[in-house]
Amino acid sequence: MSEQRRIDLLFAATVRVLALARIARRSAPALAMALVIVVAVHGTLGGIDVASVPRLAMDVPEGYLAGQRTAAVAPPPTPRGRVAEVVAEEAPRAAPALDREQQNIARFIAARYRVGVDATSEFVYHAYRAARDIKVDPMLVLAIMSVESSFNPKAQSHAGAQGLMQVLTRVHAEKFVPFGGIPAAFDPVANIRVGSAILKEYINREGTVEGALKSYVGAALSEHDGGYGAKVLNARERIAAAAAGRPIPSEMVAAPARVEPAPAMQPVSVIVETRTPLIPDESRQAVPETALPLNEAREPQLRNVSAPGVKPAGEI
């Protein structure tokens, strides 16, 4: 093939490529539309999400795509036995229904101890429920909570008392078993239930509220409780006044200090007898003060004087 023939073929191929490029550029919108139609048809028949095609999604009725997405990502069916548990976990906790008396108490506690009203409402609600079940005074339960922890469910003492009612978990560990063990002591519901049950046991054993409070604070074998019972009963009176809308009585800030009896003074004769006996005056030798040094002239010279019948040091 000659050189001229080769150049002609190359020129013709170049012209055809340019022509095809020009045609493709002009027909690009039509090709794009055809591609959209093909994808849309395949989506309706093959299960592709039509929302991935913007032009077609504009013509879909409102709400249809949302329903398709919800159906596509729907969770697997829940077993029938687990439906109640799933609903209980997902549903938000509703605020407890309190009557007027309980609402007054919840507001009083929230203002006095600077705790949220929602939290105090929970404490009051469960205190009333626990007290009703075991037949104790709910305001007494709340008064113990106020004195023991100031309504702090995470309170813990150095002695090991924990929670709202400061229950000694090492002593009453078995009472927390139905609630999951000792870690449940910081759960308000479990702590209120266990603390109320302990208070009921002490009331039945001692016969009086004062005696029960004395045992609750750990002073059952002591002569008195250091004012703990009086402070709890004072807090109970304040809670009762708030519940009834009456003026709040004054608060007992601290338990009265224990007054120890003053020690008896010893007789003077006893004090005198316990002193070191002095050497009799007859055994002392008179020494003129002029013969003594200045620093020894003001005190008796007893260095070489011994009592009668007592030999000097060094003699046998």
Image: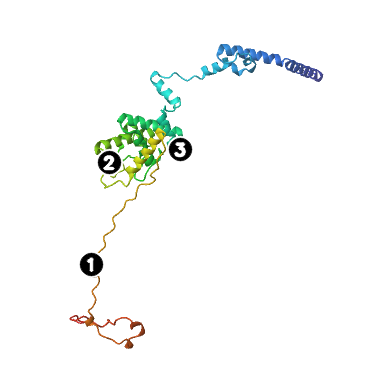
Q: Is residue 269 left or right of residue 293?
A: left
Q: Residue furthest front?
A: 247
Q: Are marks 2 and 3 in contact (CB under 8 Å)?
A: no
Q: Earlier in the sequence, mark 1 or mark 2?
A: 2
- Residue marked by disc 2: 211
Secondary structure at numbered mark 1:
helix
Secondary structure at numbered mark 3:
helix
Q: How is the image coloured?
A: rainbow
Q: Amino acid at mark 1?
A: Val
- Residue marked by disc 1: 270
Q: On the rendered image, what quadrant is the N terminus found in? A: top right
Q: Earlier in the sequence, mark 2 or mark 3?
A: 3
Return the x and y of residue 65 as percentages of the image width and height. Answer: 57, 16
Q: Are marks 1 and 3 in contact (CB under 8 Å)?
A: no
Mark 3 crowdedness (10 Å alpha carbons): few <14, some 14-19, many ≥20: few
Q: Report the disc number at residue 111.
A: 3
Return the x and y of residue 265 as percentages of the image width and height. Answer: 26, 62
